[in-house]
Amino acid sequence: MKTVIKIVLWLAAIFFGYMIYQSVNGPIEFKKVKQERFQAVVNSLKDIRDVQEAHKSATGKFAPNFKALVNFVEKGNYYIIQQRDSSYMEYDKDFGIDLQRDVKIVDTLSIVPVKDSLFKSDKRYERMMYVPFSKDGKAEFKMSTATIEKGGKAVSVFKASTKKDVVLYDQPKDLTEREKVLNSVEEINGDEIIVGDLEDVSTSGNWPPIYDRKEKK
């Protein structure tokens, strides 16, 4: 009987020891996984932002969907231009004399393919719509565009995002729930990872500077 009791006590001690270890080590491991996955998500959102900004520069507005965005990368161009002042003389009927007209001339210096400029030989743009580390790798970023009024002008805006749940789908639920309500200058606050804004003219992300470190693609 004493032997049985000792075995039970030893098993209980091992079980509670494991639980204590998990309570301490679990959050540490969760943070490592979280930061690795969030970094990959932020890198993808930066790619989306870079292509969207190039699209707006070339067309005056952001692309409405990923199909248009990928097509722009494969077929779009950057136009390197130079603007200079010039003038010419023109006869003015009202005054009956030649008057100088000042104009601005825009010269196209070169044309650079968007693909070569942003990605060179890397084809990661083909999968930039997919959320890294999502289940089966098939979840897509949610992306929307809109037109808002700013300073009396119509301005194109965009937003791309994913829920933290999508990236942390296989992590402990209690730690994931805590992550979704974080409020810290050193963390990505809220339950989403976002770039852009549909209500303001901004292409910033909601991540802290730690995620802006240069990562190898």
Image (tube, rainbow, N blue to C red):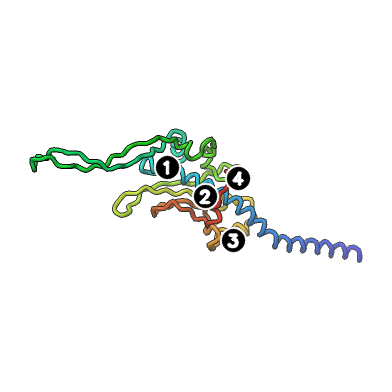
Give me the C-alpha separation between circle 4 and circle 2: 13 Å
Please name the residue shown 41% across and 38% down the image: 78
Disc marking residue 178: 3
Residue matched to label 2: 162
Q: Nearer the viewer, mark 1 or mark 2?
A: 1
Lower position in the chain sequence, tag 4 or tag 1? 1
Mark pair 4, 1: CA separation: 30 Å
Please name the residue shown 43% across and 44% down the image. Answer: 52
Observer-nearest of 106 and 136: 106
Left or right? Give the position of 91 relative to 26: left
The tag earlier along the polypeptide, 4 or 2, is 4
Q: Position of residue 88 (x, y in %)?
A: 20, 39
The residue singled out by tag 1 in the image is: 54
* Rendering coords of residue 205 (x, y %): 48, 53
* Image depth: mark 1 or mark 3 in front: 1
**Type of residue at label 1?**
Ala
Amino acid, disc 4 = Lys
